[in-house]
Amino acid sequence: MIMREGNAPPDKPTTILIADDEHLVAEGMKNHLEELGFKVIGPAGDGHEAMDLCTKFHPDMAVMDIQMPDVDGIEAADRIFTEHAIPVVMFSAYSDSTYVESSAEAGVFGYILKPVTRDQLRVGINIAWSRYLSWAEQNIEIEELKERLDQRRIIEQAKWILVKRKGVEEPEAMKMLQKQARNNRKTLIEVANAVVESDSLLGD
């Protein structure tokens, strides 16, 4: 899973993609969304087009029918969420548990039954976005923790390279890294990376 480039999502979605192969339903949904103040992308007529539009425009959210030709809503939702971290709200005439479970596994954050009213859309989008924000916050925390652990590993590696090269004790090696960082106005991880890369070149 990837997060969208670099930043946490906004507090509220502003752009929403709509996808449905039934033209009248799609136009009705588009009108509802515009009345609710959203900028609408689409409507897309099938899953392929929905994926293409998400790649091109990067909407905050996608709202799509579960049954569409070529690529259905569930497959499209899975790929849209996996590749772009764009949350999906599904709407369908079917309340069968199989559809609901498949949607949940595909990264769908909301499920609305047809016919969809404007109020249903408003509430469904708000709930889905709240769930998505919770997911994003947790995901960002995990990524930050992973980054800190990776940096700690590199700093430790650089420190022991200096221990070996300079014949100094571990605390002294850390002081050398910190001094180098201060003198060159670089971060500790930048200096550590340079030490590790230099050692790798010398090792070759």
Image: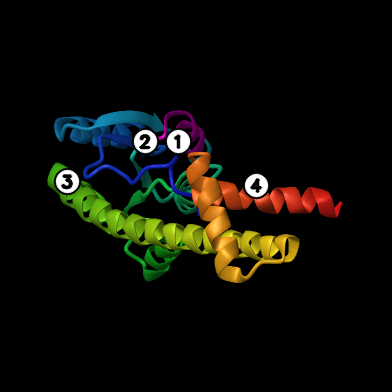
| Front residue of 21 and 76 | 76
Q: Name the front one of labels 1 and 4.
A: 4
SS state under label 2:
loop
Q: How many residues crowd mark 1 within 10 Å: few (<14), some (14–19), many (20+)?
A: many
| Circle 3 SS class | helix
Q: Is residue 23 above or below residue 198?
A: above
Mark 2 or mark 4: which is in front? Answer: 4
Q: Earlier in the sequence, mark 2 or mark 4?
A: 2
Distance between mark 1 and mark 2 Cα atoms: 6 Å
97 versus 28 height, above or below: below
Q: Amino acid at mark 1?
A: Cys
Q: Which residue is mark 2?
A: 59
Q: Is residue 51 left or right of residue 129?
A: right
Mark sitting earlier along the chain (3/4): 3
Q: Nearer the viewer, mark 2 or mark 3?
A: 2
- Percent coordinates x, y for residue 80 in the rendering: 47, 46
Neighbourhood count class around disc 2 (C-alpha, 10 Å): few under 14, some 14–19, many 20 upward: many
Residue assigned mark 1 = 54
